[in-house]
């Protein structure tokens, strides 16, 4: 094992309240161990189970943008020509659509993001970058919330008292993070945007999450983890993971080979741990960072990396397309791996009936205890 100090920092960044800006900066070194080994999906998870989703013209999936696992099943936001939000139970049976596309007050024009409040049994849909439509689990409209926002809001997560929303980096340099109460009133802003206009959004898929009163958001271009507590708006802890090959804004305009640069591909928050996948030293890697000890581990990752993950009841859930199912469940001898063998075994009960015309499949996995 090689242990050394990288450009990993903990900082208190600029806080912008509605009437009083504050600035506190304090950097702290974080010990990072680059493990002399590698990681695979079966090293992280076991007990693979497949849940085929009901094959019905009302609920065929095409381009899943977000998956949320809840005790009653799965909420799936799909973007296939038009926006749809579907509800499937834990066995994959279709339960109904959440709202619908339209122009009346009960409908949404399009979907930017979704968030689920399991305590209130509500599903919130961010639409038009400035409005939230709230529905019950039966798909019935409960209320609409207008948000006061200068910039277009494209990501959203729920916490007990309201919503946290994100914007893109923009030429005006707006704040990236806006906090609203349940009525849509702006409580505060955090994390100033760099005044550089870019075409793509600054955040990766599912980068905005809550764990209790902690909020995790990932700045894709700066390879930063930003973590705040909703009870303490003045403090934002920022963790910077890079080895010196940082993916910069200028390179975004001219360089398409992102694997040459360090960048975070996904980030998930669980208690005092942040984990996920990133390009690190030109290599796809799995990382874990302990927020309490300020220590991180990075391992080269040689396997299929789930593009979306949702966590519930000690299990991780992801979604597989028809193409992914057949590639993973029917591996060629040259490409066989423990993960493919485990998926092939889990696929056995459906081998005779599953076709390219079937719907997507949920993969359920049990997280293993790891000792790096």
Image: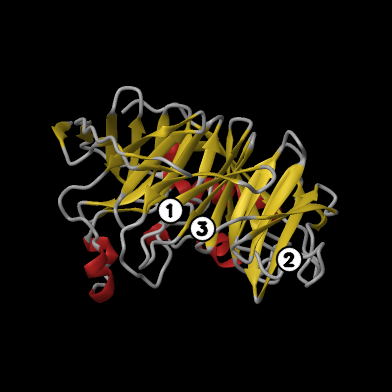
**Residue drawn 38% across and 53% down?**
265
The residue at which mark 1 appears reads as: 176
Nearest to N terminus: mark 1 or mark 2:
2
The residue most toward the front is 19
Q: How is the image coloured?
A: secondary structure
* Residue 124 on image: x %, y %: 70, 51
**Residue drawn 28% across and 36% down?**
11
Q: Quadrant of the N terminus?
A: top left
Quick check: marks 3 and 1 in contact, CB under 8 Å?
no
Cα gap from disc 3 to disc 1, whole angstroms: 38 Å
Cα gap from disc 3 to disc 2, whole angstroms: 36 Å
Identify the element where label 1 is drawn: strand
In this view, the residue in front, 35 or 170, is: 170
Along the horizontal axis of the image, is 274 left or right of 50?
left
Nearest to N terminus: mark 3 or mark 2:
2
Q: Is residue 275 visible?
A: yes
Number of the label disc, if any, that sits on residue 328: 3
**Residue drawn 41% across and 31% down?**
273
The residue at which mark 2 appears reads as: 108
* Residue 333 on image: x %, y %: 41, 59
């Amino acid at each position: 094992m090689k242990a050394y100090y990288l450009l990993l920092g903990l900082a208190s960044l600029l806080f912008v309240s509605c009437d009083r800006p504050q600035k506190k900066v304090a950097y702290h070194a974080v010990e990072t161990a680059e493990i002399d080994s590698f990681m695979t999906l079966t090293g992280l998870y076991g007990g693979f189970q497949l849940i085929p989703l009901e094959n019905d013209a009302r609920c065929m999936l095409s381009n899943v943008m977000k998956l949320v696992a809840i005790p009653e099943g799965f909420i799936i936001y799909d973007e296939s020509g038009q926006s749809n939000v579907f509800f499937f139970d834990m066995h994959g049976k279709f339960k109904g659509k959440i709202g619908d596309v339209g122009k009346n007050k009960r409908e949404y024009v399009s979907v930017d993001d979704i968030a689920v409040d399991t305590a209130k049994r509500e599903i919130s849909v961010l639409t038009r970058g400035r409005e939230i439509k709230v529905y019950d689990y039966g798909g019935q409209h409960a209320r609409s919330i207008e948000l006061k926002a200068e910039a277009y809001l494209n990501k959203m997560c729920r916490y007990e008292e309201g919503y946290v929303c994100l914007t893109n980096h923009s030429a005006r340099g707006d704040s990236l993070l806006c906090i609203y109460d349940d009525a849509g009133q702006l409580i505060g802003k955090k994390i100033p945007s760099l005044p550089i206009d870019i075409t793509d959004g600054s955040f990766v898929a599912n980068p905005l999450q809550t764990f209790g009163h902690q909020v995790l958001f990932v700045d894709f271009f700066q390879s930063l983890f930003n973590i705040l507590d909703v009870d303490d708006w003045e403090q934002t802890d920022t963790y910077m993971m890079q080895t010196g090959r940082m993916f910069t804004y200028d390179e975004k305009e001219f360089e398409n080979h992102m694997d040459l640069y360090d960048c975070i591909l996904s980030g998930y928050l669980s208690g005092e741990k942040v984990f996920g996948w990133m390009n690190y030293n030109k290599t796809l890697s799995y990382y874990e960072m302990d927020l309490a000890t300020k220590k991180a581990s990075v391992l080269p990752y040689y396997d299929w990396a789930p593009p979306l993950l949702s966590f519930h009841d000690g299990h991780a859930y992801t979604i597989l397309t028809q193409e992914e199912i057949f590639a993973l469940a029917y591996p060629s001898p040259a490409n066989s791996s423990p993960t493919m063998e485990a998926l092939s075994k889990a696929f056995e009960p459906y081998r005779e009936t599953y076709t390219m015309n079937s719907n997507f499949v949920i993969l359920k996995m049990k997280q293993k205890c790891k000792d790096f």
